[in-house]
């Protein structure tokens, strides 16, 4: 686990920015069909532990992508900002929006059974199928996207 404290980030155009205090720089990547349509590739996410403060909230659009999940984006430039379990105060921040990504570590891949064959990460990661990731999500032990 990589120790991390104060982080900041922003969307491509800067209309939305944020700060957060997080305990770990561990990044999950989700290969599910929805994440790939949403971002154009797998979604790399950093759990914020409920600590994110957003600036420019009027520029944040929210899309409910499933019965349990919602995805947010910048209304100006379209940057994918976060995935969140509906009703939770914890955000899965898009790792690509962080200003400093030097302390992040890719540790887990979820929905590995939906990963297309044309790419793969060489990182040594824990790999969960969609069913395993959803079971962990519902048990409140791990992150998952939907
Ligand atoms: Zn933007
Ligand atoms: Zn996903």
Image: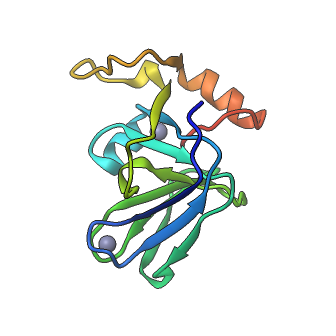
The answer to which quarter of the image holds residue 118 is: top left
Residue 102 location (% of width, % of height) = 38, 42
Furthest residue toward left: 118
Where, by quadrant of the figure, is residue 59 drawn? Answer: bottom left
Q: Give the left or right position of residue 131, taking residue 32 as reference.
A: right
Q: Which residue: 32% across, 75% down?
A: 14
Query: In this view of the protein, which residue sits in the foreground, 121 or 129?
Result: 121
Q: Is residue 14 above or below residue 45?
A: below
Which quarter of the image is occupied by the N terminus?
top right
The C terminus lies in quadrant: top right
Query: Looking at the image, which residue sits at the far right?
Result: 139
Is there any visible trace of residue 136 in the rendered image? Answer: yes
Residue 110 appears in the picture as rendered: no
Q: Quadrant of ligand 1?
A: bottom left
Front position in the image: 64 or 44: 44
Q: What residue is at 35 percent from the left and 79 percent from the top?
A: 15
Q: Can you give x and y, in whole percent of width and height, for residue 130 in the image?
A: 55, 25
Quadrant location of residue 136?
A: top right
Q: Which residue sits at x=53%, y=73%? A: 54
Residue toward you, 51 or 72: 51
- Where does residue 38 sit, x and y in percent of width and height? 35, 50
The residue at the point 54 percent across, 41 percent down is 145
Depth check: give the residue in front, 119 or 52. 52
Where does the image place residue 89, in percent across and percent down from the top left?
70, 61
């Amino acid at each position: 686990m990589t120790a991390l404290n104060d982080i900041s980030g922003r969307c491509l155009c800067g209309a939305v920015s944020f700060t957060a205090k997080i305990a770990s720089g561990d990044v999950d990547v989700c290969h599910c069909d929805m994440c790939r349509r949403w971002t154009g590739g797998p979604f790399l996410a950093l759990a914020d532990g409920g600590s994110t403060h957003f600036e420019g909230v009027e520029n944040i659009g929210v899309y409910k992508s499933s019965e349990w999940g919602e995805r947010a984006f910048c209304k100006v430039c379209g940057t994918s900002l976060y995935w969140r379990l509906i009703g939770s105060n914890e955000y899965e921040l898009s790792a690509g929006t962080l200003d400093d990504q030097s302390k992040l570590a890719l540790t887990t891949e979820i929905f590995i059974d939906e990963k297309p064959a044309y790419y793969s990460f060489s990182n040594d990661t824990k790999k969960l199928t969609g069913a395993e990731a959803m079971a962990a999500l519902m048990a409140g032990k791990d992150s998952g996207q939907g």
